[in-house]
Amino acid sequence: MKFPSEPFKIKVVEPIRRTTREERDRLLRAAGYNLFQVPAESVYVDLLTDSGTSAMSDDQWAGLMLGDESYAGSRNYYHLEETVRSIFGYKHVIPTHQGRMAENLLFSTVVKPGMCVPNNIHFDTTRANVEHQGAQALDVVIKEAYDPRCELPFKGNMDLIRLEEVIHREGASRIPLAMVTITNNSGGGQPVSMDNIRKTRALLNRFGIPLFFDACRFAENCFFIKEREPEFADKSILDIARELFSYGDGCTMSAKKDGLVNIGGFLSLNDDQWAQAITNMLILVEGFPTYGGLAGRDLETMARGLREVLDEDYLNFRVGQVRYLGELLDQAGVPILKPIGGHAVYLNAKEFLPHIEQAQFPAQSLVVALYREHGIRGVEIGTVMFGRRDPATGRTIHPELEMVRLAIPRRVYTNMQIAYVAESIVDLYRRRDMIHGLRLTYEAPVLRHFTARFEELERQPLLQRAAS
Ligand code: P61
């Protein structure tokens, strides 16, 4: 079967409320056309994120009841520690309540003002946490990553030539670590090859620079390695993960993705001195080192989720379901980012809505239309999220890509619901001319996409726009 069917049956269901178009229109106005401000109960299919939205297995729910809520030395911590060590292989395992806290602890310990951190593409929390230390977050992904039409098997790869240039330009002493994000979320959930990771490691070794992984979607990345790098065709996902992490010195992890939990994360690393400093900071801001801001039961579900996610049947379905959505859209001519990534399908808003210029937020306009017309929530990954003001001119510098991400929660929606999403988007594509742009009315100084507010622009006839 080309698209694998669900490798699970449903034991518990959560009803979803249907809403009318009028209701959604009203909600959109109240939310300032920002989908982060719309109550989740009024969403039919929620593709805002695959983060923290997974359905847990019966084994994970059973594990909840085995939560040991001791302040120090909870048995669930030891289970997590053993699990993380057996997959990731690093010496120290520091639990955190989610990924960005792992980033914050790492960067606040090792990154100093004036330094720089290269990454394939920094995710927004990673970038914000690097910049918060007064350092520069540099993206050194291969240039093809910015071409939504270019089909490469490993579009998340580091550009090794540029990485070497960065090291020569900045000086190795100003680079406390390099990162590789697997899969590369901001570039479309694209994987990084083992070959590229080996070469990145070899390059960094020449300069004595440590390598850390942003490992949120590591199992999906390993699945692509198995599928696309012939050397790994007969290896288990666990063996692939072990080899991959052996090229690093540590990782940050949001277990809300490939940990298959609703909350949780960790930082894992080899360096004793860094681990000690980070642990001291952890105690100050998160909690005792054997719970790190989580309950014992959360640690248990995380340990169990990390093992489940390595199951090939599961990964085959997971990546297959995302591909199913992407291929239905592609076959209908809807412009999507290629190839289809591991956790999400990305609509290319510049091509979907060529009549809306970037200053009028085409991707955000598409997100608004998708919700109003069909009750589906996606997320803007474009000017709202990554646009920056030029301090000299005050003008916005637009990012290359203007995308709408449809992130698929793990084990949550059936293939029939995914088919509904595809049908809805194809309908919208046929009627795309009726979608108009937006004007920003409020923005916060950092991570503005969460709270930004907009107004809808009046529809301008195409002829008039062309003349203006
Ligand atoms: C997401 F709009 N991702 O994709 P935390 N690294 C990477 C991530 O994808 C990631 C984190 C680190 C989210 C949630 C999200 O502005 C946003 O556990 C590659 O969320 O702290 C999270 O992990 C951070 C969506 C986060 C956003 C921030 O949907």
Image (tube, helix red, strand yellow):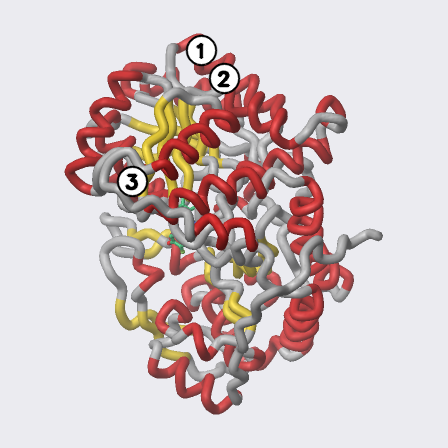
Task: For residue 344, say whether it is visible.
Answer: yes
Q: Is residue 118 above or below residue 23?
A: above
Amino acid type, callout 1 = Asn
For discs 3 and 2, the disc positioned in front in the rendered view: 3
Q: Which residue is outermost to the left?
A: 284
C-beta proximity under 8 Å, tags 2 and 1: yes
Task: For residue 398, say whether it is visible.
Answer: no
Residue drawn where x is 65% and y is 40% of the image:
311
- Drawn side of residue 246 relative to residue 177, left or right: right
Label 1 Cα neighbours within 10 Å, binned few <14 / some 14-19 / many ≥20:
few
Q: Nearer the viewer, residue 226 or 427?
A: 226
Q: How much space separates mark 2 and mark 1, taking CA atoms? A: 6 Å
Residue under label 2: 201
Amino acid type, callout 2 = Arg
Label 2 Cα neighbours within 10 Å, binned few <14 / some 14-19 / many ≥20:
many
Q: Which badge, 3 or 2, comes first in the chain's sequence?
A: 2
Q: Which mark is residue 205?
A: 1
- Drawn side of residue 418 relative to residue 119, left or right: right
Q: Secondary structure at mark 2?
A: helix
Amino acid type, callout 3 = Tyr
Q: Which badge, 3 or 1, comes first in the chain's sequence?
A: 1
